[in-house]
Image (tube, rainbow, N blue to C red):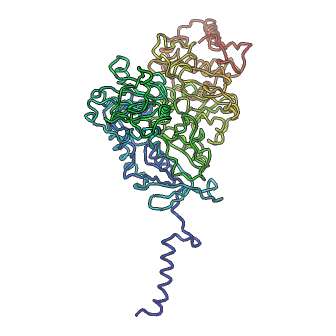
Amino acid sequence: MASPAAQCAWPLLLTFAVCVGSCCTGGAFTPPHHNYCIIGAGPSGLQMAYFLQRAGRDYVVFERSHAPGSFFALYPRHRKLISINKRHTGKSNSEFNLRHDWNSLLSHDNRLLFRHYSHDFFPDADTMVRYLEDFASTLALRVQYNTAIIHVRLEKDSQSWNGHYFILTDHNSQNYRCSVLLVATGTWVPNVVNFPGSEYVEGYESVSINPKDFAGQSVLILGRGNSAFETADNILGVTNFIHMVSRSRVRLSWATHYVGDLRAINNGLLDTYQLKSLDGLLEGDLEDMAIVKDKKGKLHITLKFYLENSNSSADAESITLPQDELDNFAPRAPYDRVIRCLGWKFDFSIYNRSLRLMPGKGNKKKYPLIKLSYESRGTQGLFVLGTASHSVDFRKSAGGFIHGFRYTTRAVHHLLEHRYHGVPWPSSVYPITQLTNSIIKRVNEASGLYQMFSVLGDIILLRENATAFEYLEEYPVGILAELELHTGRKTHNGLFVVIMEYGKNFSGADKDVFYYNRAVGEAQHAWQSNFLHPVIYYYKRLPTEREMRRRPPDWTLPRPDAVHHIVEDFLTDWTAPNAHILPLRRFLENCLDTDLRSFFAESCFLFALTRQKLPPFCQQGYMQMQGLVGNERLRRHAVEAGLMEDYTVMHSTDALFDRQRDSRDQLLKDYVIPANQHPGALPCLQPTKS
């Protein structure tokens, strides 16, 4: 029998055990807490986890499957990705090469580049699954697998970062409390159209992918995206015919410059349609159609109004069909199978109404409604990442795909770092003499600008008297008016915005992008460039939110004080001295009213003797005893190139002074400023010579 002391200890031990087991705080259960909770271990979820881990933040990723990238374990059904894997570019610059690597996530580990995983230009989806598994394990990302979040609600708390916590409940009824919620679940719920007879339709997510199952059959496919054409290509050689119906005309990615439209790798049915080999495309509203089955099991297409006065249980033989009145009705032939390939939408079902996470409008209703900062319009602290955030740039840029959202995810991380941890947006400060070089370097190698054209831009903040500048990379230009709020940087002295754009009238489903003289080659016509090219906007002050809202619909930014287009280039190599660099330098000089040229020491010496104000290059270099030390070989090269006078051949003092005066006049020849110049004009000034 236990002693009295031991008997007294048992209740204390039980109380302690209960308290510890329930994490007791005043008798109430407190769920595990994390500053950042990510739902979904797909590419965008893992990408954000990487940035949070590198920053040393408290986070967790919840993944319903046993491994990351579960979407790619099933889709695309026929296993060939349409994201390119260009392993060779002829260049060793890793940032440039990411422009043509559409599958890799961003990290510091070069082993985690997708080119090490596949040699295929269009890789297999199973390779993507293996890549994501290695990305998560190699970087030791904190992913909690086999945890399906089935409900999310808000819990008010004035002490929290956003005035509330997010309470997540998993399939085992376990709760988790989060300060910030990052939704990276993608769009995975199949789009379904309900109409009479839709029960006879097979879904893309479950239809057979064995061509033998379709041998000798007639097939109707609902939809006109890549999944529809992918399905058609798989069975093109074994079917009687394939018809494809959708409410909109086919949109080719090479015409729209949108990678989500139909890609050439999937468009075999366009050949057989236009070359009259039985297959065909039709346009019509799927909600107006109906399907009836006859006694032989064949499926007939009709319209809803033909069924209005008929018995809904009647078969095809007793129902009036369109071909009974119009004997050349296009889809009058019966079908053996109808397949639905209408894409996917976001899963709103797990979010409590308190979060006010609403669908978008129109063709964006499949995505949640979010701000241009990727934060929910209804709830502070809820950010949407990856494919689900594509409403920001739907049909405009690449934000719905890995090669786009890896950069928007990084931008969201910078926003989080500043808002919740006081870390300003990363930037570099350079002397003004490096302005031209900095822009040329970025437009020639930056992959974020290149992939997220018209969405992410580099911001150049000018310092007082334009003696230096601060360079911010890949900021979401849609929230340019809020730059100081989101970055912690000041814009008192004006700014440049560097973005990439296509020509305004070049892209569209009805555009002929192969017309003769489609490209511009002359620098003076750069503003008419059609293909992707750099555009530099200059603002004397930061645009306001009102100006951002009132800009024309097809304008990326409000009207600037000046704008410069760098002429498009066949090689996307903007380093030509006369066509690219010189016009850019003159534009910058005219906007800043300064001279951005580089000079030899002899020229700076002449300026110092004859001018009260030296060019910035001489002020920041020669006068500070900085620069390269000259030698006879360099001097001779400059003389032969016509950049310097050869003073060694002078034989008289008078001749020397005459040549110095001529050289000085040539160097100091200024630009002519038009009298009618106004802030809205495109080029600020007109130079008289190069």
Looking at the picture, how far across and down is residue 653, in whole percent?
Answer: 62, 8
Q: Quadrant of residue 500?
A: top right
301 or 420: nearer the viewer: 301
Count the labels in the image: 0
- Of 265 and 284, which appears nearest the observer? 284
In the image, residue 170 lies at what x, y percent? 47, 58
Q: Quadrant of the N terminus?
A: bottom left
Q: Quadrant of the C terminus?
A: top right
- The correct choice, above or below, for 621 with respect to 311 in the image is above
- Residue 664, by quadrant, is top right
At 64% across and 38% down in the image, what residue appears? 483
Residue 426 percent coordinates (x, y): 56, 41
Residue 439 image point, x, y percent = 55, 27
650 up-or-down from 584: above or below? above
Residue 123 visible at all: no
- Name the residue: 46% across, 25% down: 283
From the viewer's perspective, tell me whether residue 82 is left or right of residue 193. left
Q: Residue at the spot x=49%, y=72% of the render?
A: 20
Q: Is residue 85 among what the camera can see?
A: yes
Q: Nearer the viewer, residue 153 or 493?
A: 153
**Residue at figure coordinates x 62%, y 36% from the top left:** 479
